Amino acid sequence: MSFLNAQFTTITPITLVNLSGRTVLITGANTGIGLETAREILKSKPRRLILAVRNLQKGNAAAMSLRSSKQSLGNTETHVEVRELDMADNKSVRRFVDGLEGARVDFAVLNAGIVNMHVGIWTMKWQQNTSGTELDLQVNVLGPALLSLLLLPNLRLAARQHKPGSETPKSHLTFVSSGLHARARFSERGLPEGSILAALNDREKRDQGFDSTEQYATSKLLNLLWAREFAKRVGNADVIVNAPNPGFCKTGLQRDTAGMMRYVKLVVAAILGRRVEDGARCVVDAVLVKGEESHGKYLSEAQVTDEVEGIRGDEGVELQRRVWDEVTAWLKSEGAVEDGELV
């Protein structure tokens, strides 16, 4: 399906399911797709709705908005809570999971992301975290990878408590993807084994002509490859792992853009952007409606669909294995994860 056709595809409302007693966790839940996903999920009345946010003040404002929605829905069951999570900081990711104290998580939506496009007028600027990792690579790839590994015991606990034949879906781990993964040139795939992430984080080389649009697209491609390999290793007996694309929406993702490019993106979003409510429905569909048929799959317009051709078949399987090996090695080198926490 072409980009324009996809953008104007009607996304039907989600059929409500019974989430009584269940816990839903959403990262990046204070704005945009994350917030609207939370608002949509409120309709199914989970017991706990955890908003994982970088900025607690904004998170609390989002929680107030959701509590207002809760009242209008007649939802007295859901406890909305806000917890701090900075995907740019691996220590914050671990503190966040430790703070859950081993509690069950039935549905985890890894939505937090960044478009690292800070510019002058047109010039794109490299940005990195305190560990020296470029922000797209950290927030869109390494952070979600670490969080998925650390949350797996919580998801499996919920899965063990799921009753066969229940009208409630089994546990889901959902990586919010992007159609821009198909735009990545990803020339780094031709590098020797173990060299992809280092090349993407080579500031000296990339400062000579840093293309943040390409970096973002590549980061979303790597995120999708990680999700597929994670699904392969976990299997679908306990936890369903999938990766929906919400489409290009009128969201706050432009907040990470400065200069003239910010205004260009705002104009394009105003003309072609999908309503954020429709983008959120694509995500909620993957979380609550799609089942085992979506395990390890990419979804767009609320349908299981093919990824970009270059990552299909045996070539794609080998590439996702390489990404897995490099990401886990990187996380271990930073002390973020131990061998016993790998799938």
Image: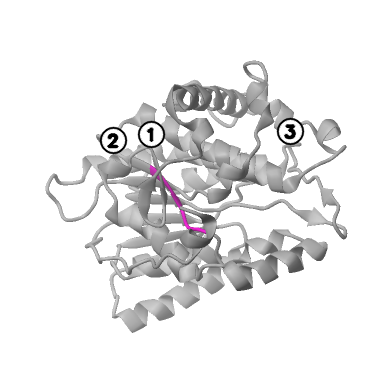
Tell me where residue 238 appears, x and y as whole percent.
27, 37
Q: Earlier in the sequence, mark 2 or mark 3?
A: 3
- Type of residue at label 3? Asn
- Type of residue at label 1? Ala
On the image, numbered disc 1 is attached to which residue? 231
Crowd rating for badge 1 (residues with CA inside 10 Å; few <14, some 14–19, many 20+): many
Up-down relation of residue 12 to residue 53 (above or below): below
Look at the numbered disc 1 and give the secondary structure of its residue. Answer: helix
On the image, numbered disc 3 is attached to which residue? 201
Crowd rating for badge 3 (residues with CA inside 10 Å; few <14, some 14–19, many 20+): many
- Type of residue at label 2? Asn
Quadrant location of the C terminus?
top left
Up-down relation of residue 107 to residue 264 (above or below): above
* Magenta stretch prevailing secondary structure: strand
Q: Which mark is residue 236?
A: 2
Q: Say which residue appears at 35% left-offset and 30% top-offset.
A: 234
Residue 43 shown left or right of residue 101 in the figure: left
Magenta residue span: 242-247
Name which quarter of the figure residue 119 lies in: bottom right
